[in-house]
Image (cartoon, coloured by chain):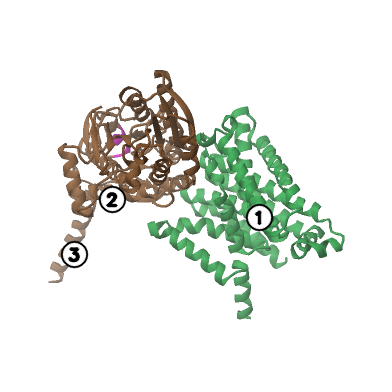
Amino acid sequence: MSARRIYFVVSILVLAALPWLIATPYWRGILVLCAMNVLLALSLNLVIGYTGQLNLGQSAFFGIGAYVSTILVKSYGWNFWLAAVAAVGAAGLLGLALAAFAVRLRGHYLAIASLGFAVITYQVLVNWENVTQGVRGIYGIMPPFSHPAALFYLVAGIAVLVYVLIDNLVRSPVGDSLRAIREDEVSAASLGINRALWKAFAFCVGAAIAGLAGCFYPGFVGTLVPDAFNIVESFTMMAMVIVGGMGTMIGPVLGAIVLTFLPELLRGFGELRLMIYGIALTLVVLFMPGGMVQAWMALRARLR
Amino acid sequence: MKLALKGAILAFVCATFAVQAQEKVIRVGVLMPISGPGSYFGVMGKEGIDLALEQLKGGVNGYHLQVQYEDSACSPLQATNAVKRVLDQFRPHIVIGEECSDASLAIAPILEQAKVPQLNAGSVTMKLTESGYRYVFRIFPNAAQQSLPLAKVAYDRLGARTAVILYEKTNAGNDNADGFEKPFVAMGGKVLAKIDFGRDVNDFTAIATRIASLGRVDVLPTFALEGQQVRLAQALAQAKVVRGGGGNAVQMGSIWLPYGFDQKAGQAAEGYVRIVQFDPNEKRRIVQDFIRAFRAKYGADKVPTHINSHAYDTILLIAEAVRRGATDSESIRERFSGFKGVEVTTGRISFDPKGQNSDLSVVHFVETQKDLSWKGLDW
């Protein structure tokens, strides 16, 4: 058995044991949130980390997944799973719509366009009151499983599945194409790689995964208001990817875990909490630009 | 000698256990925005609660009040996490908070399920006490209780026939705006425009210019947090719309605005008419005692705001429930349900069957004068 497989099996065992080791509803809730953030970080990493497309609009797809699934369940009486499939489809399609513009743009221009997309989506959620209830919000939303441990197993199980799928994807020739586009689009095109096709593919898959994470958010919080999907959320997702290690598989997972648990662990510091959190983030970016993965590799090289 | 020493140790251990067994505590979880745009609520709220706790240091009926603060940031997600944490780790008998309506609505079902009373002192959304929760109690006047008197005063006392409603696009802002519009229009008034804005808006020049172009506007009911109200008042004065800038329109506000707004807005606040529940000029003894104690603790130049006093009152009410025999969550809920005319700094508290304070006897109107002081209006 290879080391990778051993790590993977150990990780699964740890995941299975976590809800039993952490018995309080609060920390079990944080575990669910963490699994959701892992999904979001993985989705953004595919676009930014592997394809090199600076997308600042990921919160929009998260919100689309949350709203589409909730509205279908609450207003039209759909089954949660059917609604989730529709929500993932809707987020993926809108990801394609953004990709239609994104394939023509690069760097800062793409960042601004995707930021604009996030702002437009947020404004639609706020102002399309007949459908979304606007700022009045949607309340009394039930999760697919009421027990936090069951909800954690569900979301974490999906996160593991998504991880495996993306891991296989980036190891395949498709992953080589995505990385080639990331490194140099013109060179990639000269090798016969269809830039537009693969960029659109990355946007679509990334958006669909973010939409999938969005399906679990409303049931977890019990409340759905547009403010949960403002552009600050996009930056939080990006921080997870950068802190963990962009363009690696394990990096965004570590980033999501650290940035979910750190603010909660710092609650004991009261008013100093956000200051410590901000300083910690700044130090990571300053001294570990490649994130935790790079820091680990540097440490391992030094130890050898 | 050894025997005596062992005896002394045994006696000490027994005494320690006996004291621990007798120590009775009411645990109070406090959820407030300590970060974000509503953080001033948290800072002022903590001042009021700390003062009340200091005054109740000796305990009530043999019970000590023990408080744990959590930052809920005016956000449903943060508030949900904070309330779960406080329920898990602190096991409170009652929770005070949140200030913002969205966050208050998010924690209400969680506390209802945990059968822990929620004592709210800052949210106005109607839904909080209209959703059938048995464990929700609110001492802050709801949107209808604030906006209806504003509409009546605008029409009857100020003779206003036209209005432009300005409000932040939140549950609280929407409910207040609707609460003004419906009765004002029913009385015969005309709403020329309803202008909403997000909490991230900082420049109100465009909105003020638009209002200046609408023709004669008599009143401008405004529902937003203090920071935006200051900038809005200044922009309206600059556009010569309101009296503070030489215009004719009267800007009107709700209890949201803390004392001290006028000094921050400067001359733009002149002529501002608003509804208040806590008035530092009020002569009731409990109010003046509170102001004295507040100044002694926080500085002679400080004047408490309604946020300080509402937070202070929440602790007084919990103490009153304990004084009446409450020992746990359920008995606190029962005592609250029976409150009729309990006097606190923000008036008298009588909870109706939905948990809303129905006694508005001290709610009144004030007008900001040229020297930025308040003149109580006999309305």
Residue indicated by mark 3: B9
Residue indicated by mark 1: A111
In the picture shown, does residue A255 fall above or below B194? below
Q: Which chain can be seen in brown?
A: B
Mark 2, secondary structure of its residue:
helix
Q: Position of residue B30 (x, y in %)?
A: 35, 46
The kind of residue tagged 3 is: Ile
The kind of residue tagged 2 is: Glu
Disc 1 with disc 2 on a shared chain: no
Comparing B254 with B22, the one in front is: B254
Comparing B194 with A215, the one in front is: B194
| Residue neighbourhood size for the residue with mark 2, other residues' Cα within 10 Å, grouped as few (<14), some (14–19), many (≥20) | many
Q: Chain of mark 3?
A: B
Disc 3 with disc 1 on a shared chain: no
Can see residue A154?
Answer: no
Question: Where does the N terminus of chain A fall, quadrant-wise?
Answer: bottom right
Q: Position of residue B286 (x, y in %)?
A: 17, 39
Disc nearest the viewer among 1 and 2: 1
Viewed as shown, does residue A128 lie left or right of B348? right
Viewed as shown, does residue A292 lie left or right of B109? right
In the rendered picture of this protein, how many numbered marks are placed on residues? 3
Chain A takes which shade in the image? green
Q: Chain of mark 2?
A: B
Residue indicated by mark 2: B47
Q: Quadrant of residue B96?
A: top left
What separation in Å lies between label 1 and label 2 (alpha carbons)? 43 Å
What separation in Å lies between label 3 and label 1 (alpha carbons)? 71 Å
The answer to whether marks 3 and 1 mark residues whose Cβ atoms lie closer than 8 Å is: no
Q: Residue at x 30, y 24 (%)?
A: B157
Magenta residues span: B328-333
Mark 3, secondary structure of its residue:
helix
The kind of residue tagged 1 is: Ala
